[in-house]
């Protein structure tokens, strides 16, 4: 992010929210990706969203929760084979994040947790050593 873009705004995380405060009367362009549910997302829709985001040239990209589905560790009943795919789900999401960052290299990224990210937190708290 360029120095000029950094000077456009300040931000502060508070209690799961983000406050973005523009400096003076600066215009701030923000793109929000919400409920992607990787790896179960529609790749064509994601590609279209990325092209639109590139056209907008945002100062900030907000990943607004449920970026990763974490189906493999859901507390809800699922097919046993799906529980074996946790690692692949995490790796796929990591690769998708890298791709998005490559396509949108300049903006500040803010990742807000959704209830699906909470699945990971609860899993780690209860199962991880």
Image: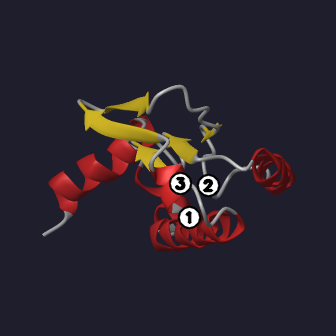
Which residue is denoted by mark 3 in the rendering? 4
**Residue at figure coordinates x 67%, y 62% from the top left:** 104
Look at the numbered disc 2 and give the secondary structure of its residue: loop
User: Percent x, y for residue 25?
Assistant: 54, 25
**Residue at figure coordinates x 60%, y 37% from the top left:** 34
49 relative position to 112: left or right: right
Q: Distance between the residues labelled 3 and 2?
A: 33 Å
Which residue is denoted by mark 1 in the rendering? 93
Residue 38: mark: 2
Look at the numbered disc 3 and give the secondary structure of its residue: helix
Q: Nearer the viewer, mark 3 or mark 1?
A: 3
User: Percent x, y for residue 44?
Assistant: 87, 53
**Residue at figure coordinates x 53%, y 69% from the top left:** 94
* Quarter in which the C terminus is drawn: bottom left
User: Percent x, y for residue 11?
Assistant: 36, 39
Residue 71 in view in this figure: no
Question: Mark 3 or mark 1, which has the lower sequence index?
Answer: 3
């Amino acid at each position: 992010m360029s120095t000029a873009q950094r000077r456009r705004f300040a931000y502060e995380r508070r209690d799961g929210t983000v406050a973005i405060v523009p400096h003076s009367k600066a215009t701030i362009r923000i793109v929000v990706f919400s409920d992607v549910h990787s790896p179960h997302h529609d790749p064509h829709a994601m590609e279209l969203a990325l092209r639109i985001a590139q056209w907008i040239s945002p100062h900030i990209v907000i990943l607004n929760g449920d970026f990763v589905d974490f189906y493999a560790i859901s507390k809800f009943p699922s097919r046993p084979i799906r529980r074996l795919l946790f690692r692949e789900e995490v790796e796929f999401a990591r690769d998708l994040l890298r791709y998005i960052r490559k396509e949108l290299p300049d903006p500040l990224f803010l990742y807000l947790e959704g209830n699906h990210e909470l699945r990971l937190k609860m899993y780690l708290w209860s199962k991880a050593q």
